[in-house]
Image (cartoon, coloured by chain):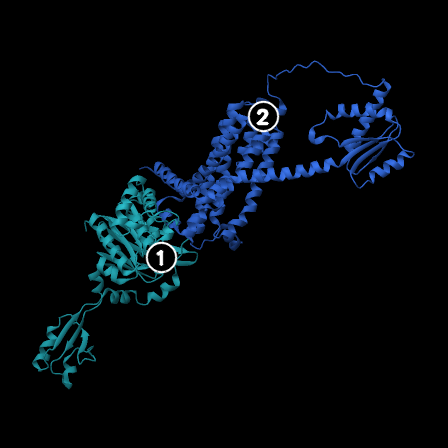
Chain colours: A blue, B cyan
Amino acid sequence: MSRLPRSLRQMLTIARRDFVATVFTPIFLLFLFAPALMGSLSALGGMSAAAMDDSTADKSRIVAIVAPATADMMRREDVRLRALYRRDDTPSDLLIQSPGRDPAAQARALMADRTRDVDAVLYGPLDRPQLLLAPRNRRTGDYMDALAQATLAAERLGGDLPRVAATRTVVERRTTSITGQHQAGFFAVFGIFFLTLFLASQVVGTMAEERNNKVIEVLAAAVPLEAVFGGKLIGMFGVALLFVGFWGTIVTQVASLLPPAAAGAIGDIAPAIGGPAFALLFAAYFSMAYLLLGSVFLGLGAQASTPREIQMLSLPITLIQVGMFVLASAAARRPDSWIATVAEIFPLSSPFAMAGRAANAPQVWPHLLALPWQMLWVVLFVTVGARLFRRGVLQSGSATPFWRRARKVG
Amino acid sequence: MTATWAVTAEGLVKRFGERPVVGGVDLRVPSGAIYGVLGPNGAGKTTTLRMLLGIIEPDAGHRTLLGEAVPREASDRVGYLPEERGLYPTMKAREAVAFLGALRGLPLSEGRRRATDLLDRVGLGHAVDEKIRKLSKGMAQLVQLLGAIVHQPELIVLDEPFSGLDPVNQEKLEALIVGERDRGATILFSTHVMAHAERLCDRLAIIAGGKRRFEGTVDEARATLPSRVHYLPRHPAPGIAALLPADAVPEGDGGWRFTLPDAGVEPVLLPLIAAGHGIAGLTIERPSLHEAFVRIVGDHAGHDRSAGENRA
């Protein structure tokens, strides 16, 4: 058998072993369902926070001290203005009181009330109102201004403001909007970053198993180290695909149960290259991002000889990923800038940036160049990682990582 | 000589940093033979085997493995049991054997079938579906050995295969080695236990101080030392020492021990009989491989221990 088919066969044998050894364990179930656990905890936390928020909101009020003749008008305007706000952005409930002998003292007394939180108190004539405001309630103050103004206008117009409702016609865009493209770009960059952050860093400790079990000697005798590294990378990539496939299926099934109107909630996401091509390129660039980062992490992790050293690597590894995300995000925001070009060419950020490009530009040819370019770097990183391992670990036998050897030389 | 060589090595040199470990080893392993590489601890045996297999590259010298100048090209035809055993502890015994075969090109389904047969043959039929971590060290070692032969390789390289095995398993291993040789495979194994080499080897090399000190058959190795004669006179008398060779020394049983002369024992015995001492007992003892080894290795043993060996 010639060299390449043999290496591929050996690579797949190792990949299969790693995949099976990872997937058919109870720990993998924990890993697979981690997002569900995370989601449940987030939902619980969110519900608790919302409950706390609601209970706080129940006790918060804005108060207007106005004459009884104006009170009804102000209530009507309050209802009209509130309809313009989102539920979580609505001002606190309005409480209207009639003015006493000293409205200013009455307002100060309301602000000092310990039985409820009063965010703002408006008093005085509506054309020259006074407003007492609790700290960090600037928007509430703006609302009170608008409420006073609307009530005054209604008063001057004899009790009601005219109601105007335009005839509405929805016009679908024939081309994707720039906002939609940018949203799609950010979605692509963040999606790949999110997935690789969770999945690619697992590769870092995979060679430790072979070193601890001494299996590496058998593997190294039977298989080129490049094939060992490649096999381990593919095996863990298989695990990542299983994870993404599992959750992708669940998410799409849940999405299909949602009413069509809910699709509008995800906004105007519209990639310039078109939906199907964008989905394909997203999958391709996720694969390349995983393989690129994974090959670097595998090479670094193979140099580490103890679990402690592997743990120490987690910080620089996360920083590398965050760095690539920041670079690619900047590229997605400014698609035609020099930073976009740098991010698209630099191998580790290239998959992120090119996914962003797919959202922002309709041309296909850059992707036909980028994918082989990224693959070339995967091969390069695997080869360099294997050679460092052969020199640093197998040949000297003392498991001296390259950074220690560099220190000795220094 | 018309034999084909399964393994050749010329002037293999390896240094780890400033420390020389192998200093120019030559080997020629005939196809179909059981060939032993003997040497004291730290002699460079493991490093030599690792260079032959292409796990590490020599600093100088050439080697061929089954006719291939690049050992990797022959890897599917080679089986290897390293000195430091290594298996995945969560793998089942049959899967472990099949996996090691698959690395060398044997389809997994066929590997599983052969693994079941082989495990049964060595008395591990009950452990086919046991995880490696549940097996004893000796059993796991046998499993790994089966992984080295499951693909029926032309060359089997075993590094200290008997270490860690009890006598029963050592016997099983010897039978397996002989069986593989009878199948037509070449066996190259390292050991520092002379008894195994004496029983198994068709030829052997003795390495000490990173260099080959001897190459030949077991008999040729023994022949590097003269045989010893133990003579017990029927009628001991004070003048007997004058009739014996100069190196003769008395023994506690009234007998004498001396080196067998090149001309044989008869020229010594005839004067003794004529003088009336007679022969109550006579034994000619050939030196053991152990004695030959100690003699050949000699002063190099001290140096060897300082050389040490390394691997991941």
Q: Nearer the viewer, residue B167 or B269?
A: B167
**Residue B119 can be seen, yes or no:** yes
Q: Is residue A208 above or below residue B296?
A: above
Q: Residues within 10 Å of mark 1 (few under 14, many from 20)?
A: many
Q: Residues within 10 Å of mark 2 (few under 14, many from 20)?
A: many
Q: Residue at x 21, y 56 (%)?
A: B202
- Give the amino acid at mark 2: Asn
On-image quarter of the N terminus of chain A: top left
Secondary structure at numbered mark 1: strand
Q: Amino acid at mark 1?
A: Val
Residue found at x 28% / y 57%: B169
> Which chain does the residue under circle 1 lie in?
B
Residue B271: image location, x then y, percent: 9, 79
Mark whose residue sits in front, 2 or 1: 2
Disc 2: which residue: A360
Q: Quadrant of the C terminus of chain A?
A: bottom right
- Depth order, front residue of A395/B12: A395
Q: Which mark is residue A134?
A: none
Q: Could you say which is closer to the camera, residue A178 or residue A389? A: A178
Query: Is A310 in front, or is A373?
Result: A310
Residue A200, placed above or below residue B230: above
Instruction: Tell me which residue sits at (37%, 64%) in the image.
Output: B305
| Residue A357 in the figure: left or right of residue A58 | left
Q: Which residue is the site of mark 1?
A: B22
Classify residue B202 as left or right of residue A205. Answer: left
Q: Position of residue B307 (x, y in %)?
A: 39, 61
| Alpha carbon separation for disc pair 2 and 1 | 61 Å
Q: Residue furthest right?
A: A101
Give percent across and percent down for residue B38: 29, 60
Left/right placement of residue B279 relative to residue A82 reads left
Are discs 2 and 1 both within one chain?
no
Which quadrant holds residue A265?
Answer: top right
